[in-house]
Amino acid sequence: MDAADAPAALPGDALREGVVERLRADLGAGLIDSHLVPQTDLWVRVSTEAWADAAASLKAQGFDYFCFLSALDWMPSPYGKGEDDPTVEKEPLSTEVVPGVTGGDTRFQVFARVTDVRRHFGVTVKADVPDTLEMPSWIPSFAGANWHERETHEMFGITFAGHPDLRNLYLPGEFEGYPLRKDFPLLSRMIKPWPGIVDVEPMPDAAEEEDGTAEATPEEGGAA
Amino acid sequence: MTMLSERQQLSYIAAQAADARLNVELETEGMTLNIGPQHPATHGTLRIIARLDGEQVVWAEPVPGYMHRGYEKLTEVRTFPQVTTLINRIDWLGSFANEVPFILAAEQLMEVEAPPRAQYIRTILFELSRIANVGLFLGDLGVQMGAVTPVFLAFRDREHVLNLIEGATGGRFHPNFDRIGGLKDDLPAGWVAETRQVMKRMRMFCDELEDLLFGNEIFQSRTRNVGVIPADVAKSYGLSGANLRASGVDWDLRRDQALPMAWDKVDFKVWTHPDGDSWARCWVRLQETRESTKIVDQLLDGLPAGPVMAKVPRIIKVPAGEAWVSTENPLGEMGYYVVSKGDLGPFRVKIRSASFNNISIASWVLKGVYVPDIITILASLYFILGDIDR
Amino acid sequence: MMVSTSSTIMMAAEIPYWGQSLLRVLGGIAAVLLPAGTIVYVFLFKMMSFMQSRLGPMEAGPYGSMQLLAEVGKWLQKEDIVPEKADAFIFKIAPLVVLVSTFLLVVVVPFGPDAWFTNFQAGVFYALAIGSVSVIGILIAGWSSANKYSLLGGLRAAGQLIAYELPMVLAVVGVVIQAGSMNLQQIVVAQNTGEIFGWGGIGLPFVLTQGLGFLIFMIAVQAELTQPPFDMPIAESELVSGYMTEYSGFRFLMFFIAEFATAGVFAFIAAVLFLGGWGVPFSWFGWETLADVDSWMNVAGPVIMLAKMTALTGIIMWVRFTYPRFREDQLQSFAWKVLIPLSILNIVVTAVLKVAV
């Protein structure tokens, strides 16, 4: 939904609502959606073009502590968890893109968090990544975004316009592919069958689940 | 990598070898020194490429990734309880502290709160992991400067804290003790009394080290005014923990954030220092360690009785949603952004680790310093490789 | 120890010249290696360990006393590695240069009234000159290793060792003025026959009157040995091992022994210059001059020297295990701006008092 249809402000969290108001004033139509959990947290979604301006606006409002920046790939993994018995036929998994909080129209979204150390709260900002996979860079507002954008680039393939030196941070120079994308398989589960297959516990039926025993026994840790 | 061809693998290996080999030609404009992944000073496999003009650094860049384990990808194939075994190993010196923000995020999505006793014990173990972690830092500081004795004292006294953690959780380094809804077990008998003794001992250790190392004139001349980071630069890079407080920013997530932990039930002082140099960072950490021992004492005094686990279903399915929780870990601010789709495991976990931001400032702060100061600055910023590389 | 041919000898038979030379050589080796072994075991293995709240090596021999032999054996049997790009000849002779300078240094130290290797009239001059030869060894080790860390270590060593030669020399000048001679034997005699305001009870060890010189000398020795707080050339946490990085096996053993042997020999020299050397105050036994001293002093002298050497080395090692290291520029400014002016002041005051008083 766009700014004109903003939901009615929830009572009791004037601080966070004030942030939304100020962003609306600075970005206008750039502010697409917001999600407020009162007294807990605030999510804001902006348009792709307003991504860098959102950073500047938030910094001007006092959010000068840069927490992190990364990306989300909303497509579920077609490979599943790789814990199924390979001899058993399994159905192909759905790869329908379903976005999360504050919605989204694209498969990839970048998100970042900034904090105000004087007023003691932070904001998570999200934006859709267009099919060209190009986003403006946050470096003009927050110098610390440098490494985060490099990591996002190598893991998801998103380029940041205005980044001085967008090369790999973790991966070796010749690496091909973007590992954190859901269609990049987790090779350790592809190479050989997962050792825990024989011990996989069948899903309990609904009756047992509602019963809810007092102690939750942790599941056995699995090998990678 | 099975995806690369033979030719690509060989060329990758050759490129890495050429990269890592120390350059023999002396360029008179400046020498490129590779403080390589294997080095006695870097806490792990961090590589710093420095271009030197004599003994002065003209340009320096840290190259992380030698220990990248792909944690964010690995969490996507695990169930929620399995993720705790994994994230224990991010900051391996203060490992209980790594589990806590993730568990809190999952509990926030499930709308479950751990019972009061569990919250107190979680906070106590959190502070113990801080003492263990920063205790090592204090000793390690001496070794980086050349004083070989404090590190042995640090290890000797840290053993007591590790014994406590082992007594409660069963693991010295990787407790894996936190569960969604509470803790795995209650405390053993006699643990509370033993902890009080150990806290007294750690206070003595802090005093000893303050005298031996911090009072030493050479140490002071090596660290004062070395690597000054002003507050606004620190904030824009996301420096956290003692590094930020040493630049004068009064920001402590234990005090300034409302979390279902027991920090709001105790009185403690948040230490800051206006200078922002290496001395300030080291000094703030020393004071914080002492403060942690006092926090543990207060928590032990107020430990409530009761269960240590809330009612959660046997098979944990976290409802769909997104949550962000961060805590004041020994290294800085560590947080988890957990995206859940209602499955047994998370859909995506973004791990915000403190050392990643702390070391990203290295190329800014290392310009124009001497070679020995590189070591001093990195030692005072304090990172753990697992935290940078995840 | 060897006796000079012109005085009464302890053994019944006259020792032929080749025998004397052999004894001198063996004595010299013992004089260098015995202190090295003592220092390594007592201070490096045990004192450092106890300071650090641990026991140190305990396995080899009772209380780890054979550890040094075990280490020597280990190093001797290691592969001889010379880096490919290194200048092989220079790389191989560098540790020899350092070790040889130590042996050359010990020949001028007197261990008793007749127990000395050589008795140069300008013994002090010779000692200080030879002490600088090891600098060359360190420099060429750093350069020839074809390793940037070694080069940095070698360059730092060049600056540091040359800078700290000066305070060492100037501190000794005060002793020479006070003793009136550059002959080390004469300096010992001067201390042991001296009097403090007419009282000869403890002689006149120059540490009392040349206290500032003693302090400067010990600091300069610490720097000459590249021990912390002056171990920038080695700087383990930055340069891995500095100029010694590429050395392994037997060559590293030579550097290692040279480090501790030189510490011992410099401690001998400091004992001679400041603590009264091999002697006790002559007034205890009613001696007046060197000729009066009994022959048994030739056996007791080395023992006394060993004790004084151990005490001084203990201080060197104690400081070594406690202090962090100086940065190179702080180290240099300390030498040039603090130590040299102080030592010149010391000389001036000594000279004035010597002439006036």
Image (tube, helix red, strand yellow):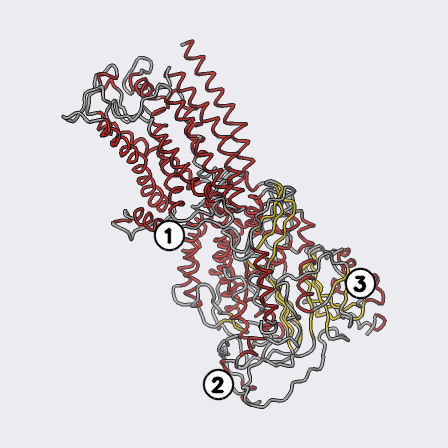
Provide residue B216's location: percent of width, then percent of height.
Answer: 49, 39
Of A201 and C238, nearer the camera is: C238
Three-letter code for the amino acid on which mark 1 is drawn: Lys
Q: CA distance from mark 2 to mark 1?
A: 51 Å
- According to the picture, the residue beneath numbered tag 1 turns out to be C78
Residue displayed at 37% across by 33% down:
C102
Camera-near label (3 vs 2) is 2
Q: Chain of mark 2?
A: A
Provide residue A131's location: percent of width, then percent of height.
Answer: 77, 72
Three-letter code for the amino acid on which mark 2 is drawn: Val
In the displayed structure image, the side of residue C66 where residue B178 appears, left or right: right
Query: Vertically, is B343 above or below A13?
Result: below
Instruction: Count the marks.
Output: 3
> Which element carries disc 3, helix, strand or loop?
helix
Q: Are marks 1 and 3 on the same chain?
A: no
Q: Are marks 3 and 2 on the same chain?
A: yes
In the displayed structure image, the side of residue B186 where residue B345 appears, left or right: right
Q: Chain of mark 1?
A: C
Query: Vertically, is A160 above or below B322?
Result: above
The image quadrant of residue C315 is: top left
Of C283 and C80, nearer the camera is: C80
- According to the picture, the residue beneath numbered tag 2 turns out to be A198
The image quadrant of residue A140 is: bottom right
Residue A18 visible? The answer is no
**Which disc number belongs to residue A23?**
3
In the displayed structure image, the side of residue C14 where residue B325 appears, left or right: right
Camera-near label (2 vs 1) is 1
CA neighbours of label 2 inside 10 A, class few (<14), some (14 to 19), many (20+): few
Provide residue B355's location: percent of width, then percent of height.
Answer: 59, 57
> Which element carries disc 1, helix, strand or loop?
loop
Three-letter code for the amino acid on which mark 3 is drawn: Leu
